[in-house]
Image: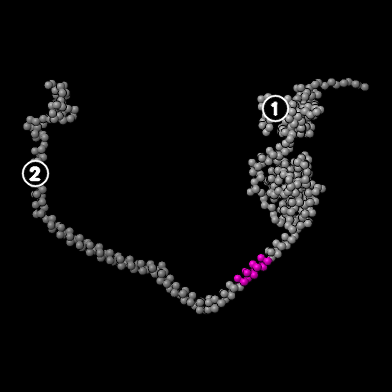
Amino acid sequence: MNNQITFYSVTDITKYIYYKFETDMSLQEVYLQGEISNFKYSGKHCYFSLKDQNAEISAMFFYPHNMSLNFKPMDGMSVQVVGKIQVYQKRGTYSIVVQKMAQAGIGLLYQEFLDLKEKLQREGLFDERKKLKIPEYPEKVAIITAATGEAVRDIISTFNRRFPLAQLKLYPALVQGRDAPQDLMRALQWVYRDNEADVIIIGRGGGSFEDLSCFNDEKLARMLFASPIPTISAVGHEGDYTICDFVASFRAPTPTGAAMKLTKEKKDVIETLVNYSKRLKTSITAKLTHDFQAWNHCIHSYGIAQFKQVIEGKYQNYLDTSNRLMQLSPEKIAKRLEEQIGQYQLRLQQLIQGRIESNEWQFTHYEVRLSSQVMEKIIAQQETVLEGLTDKLVLLNPFQLMKKGYSIVYKQHMMITSEKELANQDDIIIQFHDGKVKATVQK
């Protein structure tokens, strides 16, 4: 018999323990309550211990998860935390990595409820304008609750006691515990697949805040918000509020209240039907009376009583209108326009001919006036005027004066009219009648 013993290394056994912790699903999300001890910050991370009378566990609250803290943790403070248990292999110790923390007086579940409520409200999931209208007389009602709970019995008895027009169908689901949110969503998907219900009741009877916490699940709330079928949340008693109450199309204080919302009292329904019947009878009577009076007025009207005379008058109007239309037909209008155009052309030709003859007479008259004798006289007069102007031009010509010994002095292309405008050594140009010379002023 071989009694050989195998010795493992510390690393091997620590890895084995680490593996056990990582694969144990009950250690992945642990809820603990204890007293804070040795709380401190290291950078942005929090390190402390949680203890009770008999045990202690190390805790780490890393950034940015610790940003959700709305109080200042202190030694000796009683808190509730949720987190994951893990093994630190190097030292062979275990600790809890905290994801959320709240004061024990408030309660972690309630704090999570408030945080989720605020988040979904900011996103608009509670907006009344986005909620579907509850039908007044539903034909089929889907009920999502526990199959053996008080809620389903209260709903059924309320429907039977009042005016049971609707057909009820139960979609059983867990309404308490860790797996309840997933089971409630499964039942909702079942209702959507059937696609028969006019409205959905989801809820349960009364219980503690922890018992009702499955109706505070975020995924469930978003599924109710996106529901294509109107929903009624009926969770707990009148004072209990859950996230489903805020998201659903309508919040009933109790399951019984949900059933009352979807039903009517027999007395009220009968009274409504009687009122509608009376209103319908009155409306039909008034309609028939009005139509009979209109018919009676019609058959005794002049148009019906004197039908032949009216038709003959209308026929004569038709003939008169037809004759007028014939006179106004496009063919006749075009013919009249053609005749008018011919007359206008003849008058235009006569007018042009008269103008031509008149202009010819005027031309002959002007031609006689412009005879050679008249033209010669005019030319002689103009030559005399021209000779006078020429003599004046010759007398005023500066070059004629310069031939007599006069000259013009220029300095820098400007004509000099006084000696005061000149200085010694100025360069000047002297203009004679037959040319120019350059000179310099000496004195």
Q: Give, as a three-letter code, the residue at label 2.
A: Gly
Q: CA distance from mark 1 to mark 2?
A: 126 Å
Between 11 and 351, the residue placed more toward the observer is 11
Residue for badge 1 = 46
Name the residue rendered at 76%, 42% in the picture. 212
Residue 196 visible somewhere in the drawing = no
Q: Quadrant of residue 301?
A: bottom right
Magenta region, residue range: 278-291
Q: Are marks 1 and 2 in contact (CB under 8 Å)?
A: no
Quick one: quadrant of the C terminus? Answer: top left
Please determine whether, in this image, residue 428 is positioned above or below residue 239.
Answer: above
User: What is the x, y in percent for residue 354?
Assistant: 22, 64
User: Which residue is under mark 2?
Assistant: 388
Residue 159: image location, x then y, percent: 77, 55
Residue at 15% from the left image edge and 23% from the top image edge? 423
Q: Nearer the viewer, residue 343 or 144?
A: 144
In the rendered image, the vertical position of residue 30 relative to residue 388, given as above or below = above
User: First in sequence: mark 1 or mark 2?
Assistant: 1
x and y, in percent, of residue 21 in the image: 78, 29
Q: Is residue 132 left or right of residue 313?
A: right
